[in-house]
Amino acid sequence: MKRFVCDCGTTQSLFFESSRCLSCQRLSGYCYKENAMLSFDETKESGVFMARGSRYQQCKNYRHHQVCNGMIRLANEVQPNGEALCFACHFNSNVPDLDVPEHLPLWRKLETAKRRLLFTLQSLGLPIRDREQEPEAGLSFSFMADKTAGDHFNSPLADQEPVFTGHANGNITINLAEADDVARHAARVAMGEGYRTLLGHFRHEIGHYYWDVLIARHPVLLGEYRKVFGDERESYQDALDRHYKRSNDDDSWKGEFISRYASMHPWEDWAETWAHYLHMLDTLETAQAYGIVTEVENAAVIDTKEITLPQEERYYGKNSSIEDIVSNWIYFSVVLNALNRSMGLPDAYPFVISDAIRAKLAFVHRTIHSVG
């Protein structure tokens, strides 16, 4: 993630999630067309804000629910539309039932993770087609619950079918329980996972979406994929049954797969590897943007305050090196884990990248940069 700074004359950081500058107290928000966090001045026009000489309005979900911070630029003389959605919110197919008070803060967490995901996808120049552009398989998101939020999702809702986090034909469904820290921790422990985050779910499921977009439709890439990850035509249900019969203590997957879940089926191996690739890029960019050395101790730190899309060639460009990315990540993840331990926290990245996993990451890298 880039580092954003308010233009109020201070060095006050604007985080990607910020809704107000803590120094000048102006409204702030993210503008997708400009790829920038900006602070805004109020105007005499109702619902209109000014920044850098242009008129803006808040996304409907920002203005009414404060679950996003998207700002929409208005053409001259165009009046604000109270129903207008920002780039991120217009992908929503289903949102949580807001008649349940506990759902609102959980929806806010979902939107925060989704916006960060979309930022990375845009940074990589990946195609992002919505349901209007591609009605049968365009990208959309459904955020749904099948249990009650009041008891951390322990009690089933009446007349509600089970909601499974997953991807199907472009639609990514996230069970609202994943946004509840208590429920998500319980699931992580029950499944013997070392890592389970909301952002991780989004990055994993979008991997399935891009498998359909980038690989399934391209025979040459599909053949290469099968050589690296295996044959996805293997019965998914059989693989799923075998996976959940295995003990959480079974570590036979280590070395060949980035996680236990990745060992279940070639589709999941791809999605898990894809998610880790995005973990690496976003974290390395954030570290560099804040002047943290991410390689050898005496490496030069590059100022990235003025990065615009496409992101810095080192991590996001077509000429970026997967060897450079992985080597820097291995070094920095050790530092990251050491920092966490100094705070009494679990390792931020409890994974080992073997040569086999490097090869899979390299395939993900090549596939992404084959676009266009």
Image (cartoon, grey):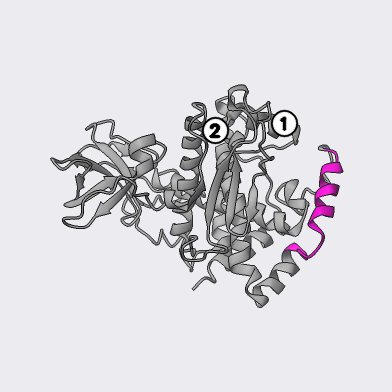
Name the disc covering residue 339, or none. 2
- Please state which amino acid type lies under the numbered disc 1: Val
Crowding at dot 1, Cα within 10 Å, few <14 / some 14-19 / many 20+, comes out as few
State which quadrant residue 8 falls in.
top left
Residue visible at 39% across and 35% down in the picture: 65
Q: Is residue 272 left or right of residue 81?
A: right
Badge 2 amino acid? Leu
Q: Is residue 69 visible?
A: no
Q: How many marks?
A: 2
Q: Quick one: SS at disc 2?
A: helix
Residues tagged 1 and 2 counted as in contact (Cβ below 8 A): no
Q: Residue at x 53, y 58 (%)?
A: 139
Q: Residue furthest top?
A: 151
Vertical position of residue 95 compared to residue 369: above or below: above
Q: Position of residue 126 (x, y in %)?
A: 49, 63
| Residue at the extreme bottom of the image, as rendered | 220
Q: Is residue 232 magenta?
A: yes
Give the x, y percent position of residue 356: 73, 58
Where's residue 212, x and y in %? 62, 64
Indicate whether residue 228 is drawn in magenta.
Answer: no
Disc nearer the start of the sequence (1/2)? 1
- Looking at the picture, tell me which residue is in the foreground, 311 or 297: 311
Q: Nearer the viewer, residue 5 or 182?
A: 182
Disc on res. 135: none
Q: Which span is picked out in magenta? A: 229-247
Q: Which residue is mark 1?
A: 189
Indicate which label's residue lies in the foreground, 1 or 2: 1
**Quick one: 17 or 135, which is closer to the camera?**
135
SS under mark 1: helix
Residue 137 x/y as whole percent: 57, 63
* Separation (CA) of disc 1 from disc 2: 23 Å
